[in-house]
Amino acid sequence: MNAKAETTSRLDQLKWLVVIAVVAVGVVGNSYYAGESVLYRVLALLALAGVAGGLALTTAKGIAFREMVKEARVELRKVVWPTRQETGQTTAIVVVVVLIVALILWALDSLFAWIIASLIG
């Protein structure tokens, strides 16, 4: 069992090195071909990103990441989203509270400015 884990770990390390190399090729290639059309460079970078991402998803961390994304999507389906009416009402309440707090802060600022002006003369 330990030999298998060691082999998998080394294979994952090799895959991550290849991913880093692919990303480096993309960065250097983008600089080297700076005179070429932006469209071609973007398409090449997207292709390299796809290769690097696909390879990264085959590692142990990549598989764990895929599982987490699947679980997050399942949890997202469980969320009860507010209706349009509830959203509007909540927004109105927030706006009113913000206005009230702004008025209170303005009044306190004016009061303190008046007190300081009276003391200073």
Image (cartoon, grey):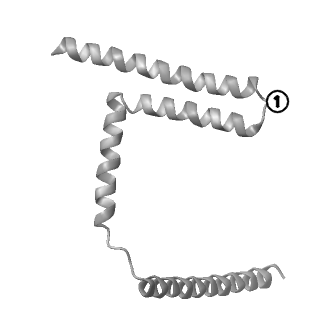
Quarter holding the C terminus is bottom right
Q: Position of residue 97 (x, y in %)?
A: 53, 85
Element type at mark 1: loop
Look at 62% across and 33% down and name the residue there. 45
Residue 102 image-quadrant placement: bottom right
Q: Could you tell whether 67 is left or right of 116 in the image? A: left
Look at 21% across and 15% down and name the residue there. 4
Quarter holding the N terminus is top left
Residue 117 image-quadrant placement: bottom right
Whether 38 is drawn above or below 101: the answer is above
Counting labels gives 1
Whether 73 is drawn above or below 17: the answer is below
Q: Amino acid at mark 1?
A: Gly
Which residue of the protein is positioned furthest toward the left in this rendering?
1
Look at 44% across and 33% down and name the residue there. 54
Q: Could you tell whether 87 is left or right of 113 in the image? A: left
Q: Position of residue 52 (x, y in %)?
A: 50, 29
Q: Could you tell whether 108 is left or right of 69 in the image? A: right
Residue 81 image-quadrant placement: bottom left
Which residue of the protein is positioned furthest toward the right in this rendering?
121
Q: Position of residue 5 (x, y in %)?
A: 23, 18
Return the residue nearer the eye: 83 or 119: 83
Look at 57% across and 82% down and name the residue there. 98
Q: Could you tell whether 12 is left or right of 19 in the image? A: left
Which residue does the numbered mark 1 point to in the structure image? 35
Q: How many neighbours does mark 1 have within 10 angstroms: few (below 14), some (14-19), or many (20 or more)?
A: few
